Image (tube, rainbow, N blue to C red):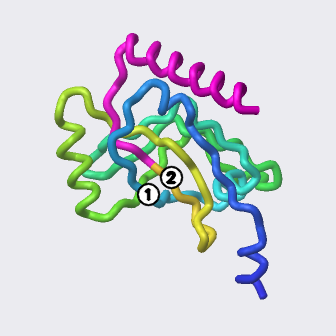
Amino acid sequence: MSSNAASNTPRLSISNRKAGFSYELLQTFEAGMVLLGSEIKSIRQGKVNMGDAYCLLIDGDLWVRNLHISAYKEASWLNHEPMRDKKLLLKGHELRKLQHRMKEKGYTVVPTRLFISERGWAKLEIALARGKKQHDKRESIKDRDVERDMRRDTD
């Protein structure tokens, strides 16, 4: 009965739109996260801000920093620190690929989306990215405006 109830619940998906504007997203990966109980409950309530979040390598592991998960109201003294660094769980070959690319100049890893998987696990979609120059950002704004105008004309 619980598996049927889980499939009927709406899926949570929180996007980091700032990442797509500031970076050219080259390749995406799906990573699990090491979370505390109060953190997953806050995520399921949608109390996440990932605007300033970024990923970094520490001792061969990938961590996400500045991912704000609000404190869970009902957790009392067992609550978590909202800006706590969270370890990301990737397959070995994916982690090695990201390590190799992050050593090259201009490449970084940014979180793009936080979602709840089919099995009920919180997953973070991360992307290997290269920073956009100012003129590239202007080009993105212009393309977005043209696309919006075209949609408006068809309606």
Residue shown at 53% from the left, 18% from the top: 141
Residue shown at 58% from the left, 27% from the top: 147
Asked if residue 84 is among those painted magenta in the image, a careful observer would answer no
Where is 110 relative to 10, above or below? Answer: above
Label the magenta part by its dominant secondary structure.
Answer: helix
Residue shown at 68% from the left, 55% from the top: 12
Tell me how far mark 2 sits from mark 1, CA to CA.
5 Å
Q: Amino acid at mark 1?
A: Ala
Which of the 4 image quarters holds residue 1? Answer: bottom right
Task: Classify residue 89 as left or right of residue 112.
Answer: left
Q: Which residue is mark 1?
A: 31
Which one is nearer the viewer's eye here, 127 or 88?
Answer: 127
On the image, the x and y values in percent for residue 133 come to: 35, 16
Which residue lies most toward the right here? 74
On the image, the x and y values in percent for residue 86 come to: 48, 49
Task: Classify residue 74 as left or right of residue 128.
Answer: right
Q: Residues within 10 Å of mark 2 (few under 14, many from 20)?
A: many
Which one is nearer the viewer's eye here, 1 or 141?
Answer: 141
Helix, strand or loop at mark 2: strand
Which label sits on residue 124?
2
Which residue lies most toward the bottom here? 1
On the image, the x and y values in percent for residue 104 come to: 17, 34
Helix, strand or loop at mark 1: strand
Residue shown at 22% from the left, 46% from the top: 99
Q: Amino acid at mark 2?
A: Leu
Which one is nearer the viewer's eye here, 69 or 120?
Answer: 120
Q: Earlier in the sequence, mark 2 or mark 1?
A: 1
Where is 82 relative to 23, above or below? Answer: below
| Residues marked 2 and 1 touching at CB (< 8 Å) | yes
First to last magenta residue range: 126-155
